Image (tube, rainbow, N blue to C red):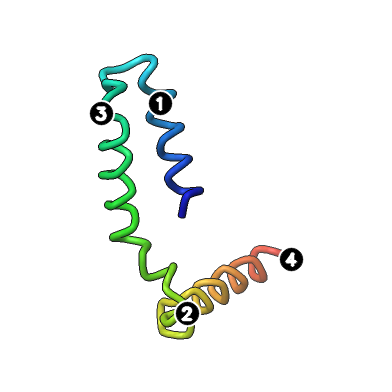
Amino acid sequence: MNEIIAVIYYCLWRYNEETIFKQSQIESDVFVCFSNIMSELGDGFMVQLDNEQGGLFEKCKRIDNILKQADF
């Protein structure tokens, strides 16, 4: 999950050079963004739910089917 936080932090830090974000508040802004993302995607990171409907394996199967259809 640190990969997710690193991307958010980098984006806010780069965006900060041109906008209204205060350097001292970036950490709290990153936390809020990360919390919102994890509330939507959090179940995808739980091993117990990998085999459930909507779990990681089903999502991978859906992507695989889309790629098979698109790959003539």
Secondary structure of residue under mark 2: loop
Q: Which mark is residue 25?
A: 3
- Label 4 element class: loop
First in residue order: circle 1 vs circle 3: 1
Which numbered circle lies on residue 33? none
Marker disc for residue 13: 1
In depth, the one of 8 and 54 nearer the eye is 8
Q: For residue 72, which numbered disc appears in the image?
A: 4
Q: Nearer the viewer, mark 2 or mark 4?
A: 2
The residue singled out by tag 2 in the image is 50
Quadrant for the C terminus, please. bottom right
Dot 1 lies on which element? helix
Whether residues under marks 2 and 3 lie with C-beta atoms below 8 angstroms apart, the answer is no
Real-space Cα separation, disc 2 to disc 3, in angstroms: 36 Å
Inter-mark Cα distance, 4 to 1: 42 Å
Amino acid under disc 2: Asp
Q: Residues within 10 Å of mark 4 (few under 14, many from 20)?
A: few
Q: Are marks 4 and 3 in contact (CB under 8 Å)?
A: no
Depth check, mark 1 against mark 3: the one in front is 3
Sequence-wise first label, 2 or 3: 3
Looking at the picture, how far across and down is residue 30, in whole percent? Answer: 32, 39
Residue farthest to the top, as pictured: 18
Q: Amino acid at mark 3?
A: Gln
State how far apart marks 1 and 3 are (Cα): 10 Å
Cα separation, mark 2 vs mark 4, equals 29 Å
**Between discs 2 and 1, the one toward the N terminus:** 1
Taking the image as shown, residue 44 lies to the left or right of residue 60, namely: left
Name which residue type carries label 1: Trp
- From the viewer's side, name the closer residue of 63 and 50: 50
